[in-house]
Image (cartoon, rainbow, N blue to C red):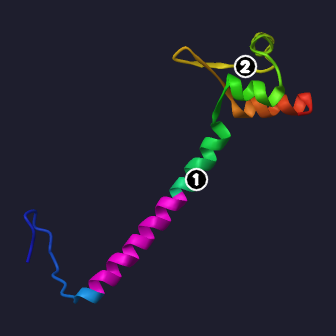
Amino acid sequence: MTDTIGTPRTQVVMDYDDLTRMMDEMADKIADKVKQITQTTNEGQDQGRLMSAKEVRVIFGVTDKTLHVWNKTGFLPRVRIGGVVRYRREDVERAAQVKGK
């Protein structure tokens, strides 16, 4: 038997229990793969995560004006995305080490 593009096809006959077991195994493998991908993606996002000005103010206990000065002096650079100010987590962690927070 061949399909429409000429590739040989094999017909498999199995009972309901075998089919269910095979589907469960496939679902488990897919779930494991999704979990691996999600963990890897989340780890990468955590390191490259952008933080809001409010989050940064809370960490350092400073005002928006102080964050503005830190940006101007290069101590804690900010990123603008569509007019919204964000701070890179790695920049905040570096600044925290310098400030001893």
Q: Say whether disc 2 or disc 1 marks the residue closer to the N-terminus.
A: 1
Question: Dividing the image into 4 quarters, which one contains the N terminus?
Answer: bottom left
In this rendering, the answer to whether 56 lies above or below 24 is above
Label 1's element? Answer: helix
Residue 78 locus on image (x, y percent): 68, 19
Which labelled disc corresponds to residue 40? 1
Question: Dividing the image into 4 quarters, which one contains the C terminus?
Answer: top right
Question: Image quarter for residue 69?
Answer: top right
Q: Is residue 37 left or right of residue 21?
A: right
The residues bearing labels 2 and 1 have C-alpha atoms spaced at a distance of 27 Å
- CB within 8 Å, label 2 to label 1: no
Q: Is residue 15 left or right of residue 65?
A: left
Residue 65 locus on image (x, y percent): 77, 10
In this rendering, the answer to whether 49 lies above or below 22 is above
* Residue under label 2: 77
Q: Is residue 25 magenta?
A: yes
Q: Which residues are magenta?
A: 18-36
- Residue in the image at 51% along x and 56% along y: 37
Q: Dot 2: within a 10 Å radius of its alpha carbon, few (fewer than 14), some, or many (20 or more) residues?
A: some
Label 2's element? Answer: loop
Q: Dot 1: within a 10 Å radius of its alpha carbon, few (fewer than 14), some, or many (20 or more) residues?
A: few
Number of numbered discs visible in the structure rendering: 2
In this rendering, the answer to whether 30 lies above or below 52 is below
Q: Is the magenta region chiefly helix, strand or loop?
A: helix
